[in-house]
Image: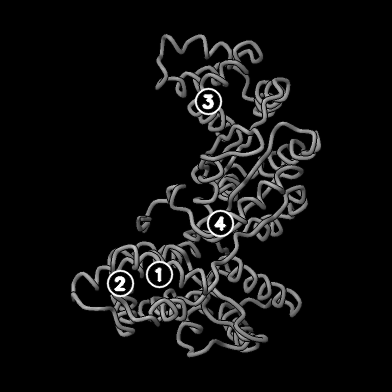
Amino acid sequence: MSDFYTGSPLDPEDMWFRDDFINLLWEILRTEHVLLTAPRRTGKTSVMDFMAAKPQEGYSAISVFVQDLDHPSEFLLTLLDAFQAKHPVLFRKIFKSGSSWIGSTLDRIEEVGFAGFKIALREQKSKGSDDWKLLGDHEFFEVVRRSKQKLLFIVDEFPDLILNMKRNHPELVRPFLAWFRSHCVSPHPKHDTIRWLLGGSVNLSSTLDAMGSIDLINSLHDERLPVLTSSQVQEFVSRMLSDRNVDFHSGIPSEVANRLGRPVPLFLQMVTQDLYRIWKRVQRPLEIEDVHTAFSELIVSSAARDKLQHYYSRINQYYDEPKRSAAYALLAKLSQSNHGVPRKALEQEFDRLIQSQGDNLPDHERRRLFNQLLRDLENDFYVAETSNDQFDFASGLLKAWWKKYYA
């Protein structure tokens, strides 16, 4: 019986509905590096954790989370830290004699102990060259490639690394991305022993486009995590309740799918868990009305508050003005609609806000900003096109929560 997951990523043993997609990623990785994009809380990290736990094609996998990093040196040291922690024997075999300062750090492991390796690695680096390109080229990747060992580096939240670098070390963004691209194209992935699987829940393309650097990621295969289908949502609800011997009306799984809209797996887990708790509380078969109760309770619950609040707060973090203010205005308008808002009406609301801020943008620039904002809101899972030029919240739960607290 699968557990409920309302915080941490899934245990690989509890992964549902992703087998075909994971096989597709391995197929792509045979000849390309991959940028896996998906909004937060939709299962991206769970897929990457599964691939790290069960690598194919003879690869050894090294997985890192780089959301809080902001410098190329820290990125490379984090990769080395994770490599040593996950594959200590292989790490020693590759680097003991192949890399000067990594090898000398390995000599000190007996002195500092395994737990002190990361500290010793950084201390050794601080005494040597500050040239991160030299570290990456000659001390790290050149040594790995000479070893012929197949390595898959799984890097979660890679776009956050770039955004942090843009804020704190803007002069390094283009040099780092150009350097990284060079390692993605030479040698050609088909003949390389290194593969990259980069994960991102922030729209990296829009960010780099605004910086004039979109060309530096065109060597990556951009693959979007598929949205769960209505039938998969219904299967999940039915199996999770049935496995717990819950009696429920046959229409409950489809009603959950209808209320969720475009499903966020986290919200699906939370609603289904709440239905189970309602059943335990009322001690009778679940009825359709219990689905509405579960949604209403979830909107005001402390368990959901922080997770839903993230969708509101992240706009302030990742969207620059005037798109930031416009995003909040458009989402407030959409949350109050019954069945969405036409694109033209959203553009008029955008124009009104731009004019109220005193921005006298040329028409072509205003249209460009609006189209980019709408694209970003779609890519970040806030809105979806429900019919021809009609838009609404992608998630029914997020729409109800947004209307309650921010309309």
In the rendered image, the vertical position of residue 64 relative to residue 18, given as above or below: above
Disc 1 element? helix
Q: Earlier in the sequence, mark 1 or mark 2?
A: 1
Nearer to us: label 3 or label 2 = 2
Give the Cα distance between marks 1 and 4.
Answer: 17 Å
Whichever of callouts 3 and 2 sits on the residue coming sooner in the sequence is 3
Pick the residue in front: 7 or 103: 7
Q: Which residue is mark 1?
A: 237
Which mark is nearer the camera, 3 or 4? 4
Q: Earlier in the sequence, mark 3 or mark 4?
A: 4
Identify the image quadrant of residue 55: top right
Which quadrant of the figure has residue 111? Answer: top left
* Residue 87: numbered disc: 3
Per the image, the residue denoted by label 2 is 275
Between discs 2 and 4, the one toward the N terminus: 4
- Assess whether mark 2 and mark 1 are in contact (beta carbons under 8 angstroms): yes
Q: Nearer the viewer, residue 104 or 352?
A: 104
Disc 3 crowd rating (10 Å Cα; few below 14, some 14-19, many 20+) is some
Please tell me which residue is depicted at 77% across the width and 47% down the height of the picture.
219
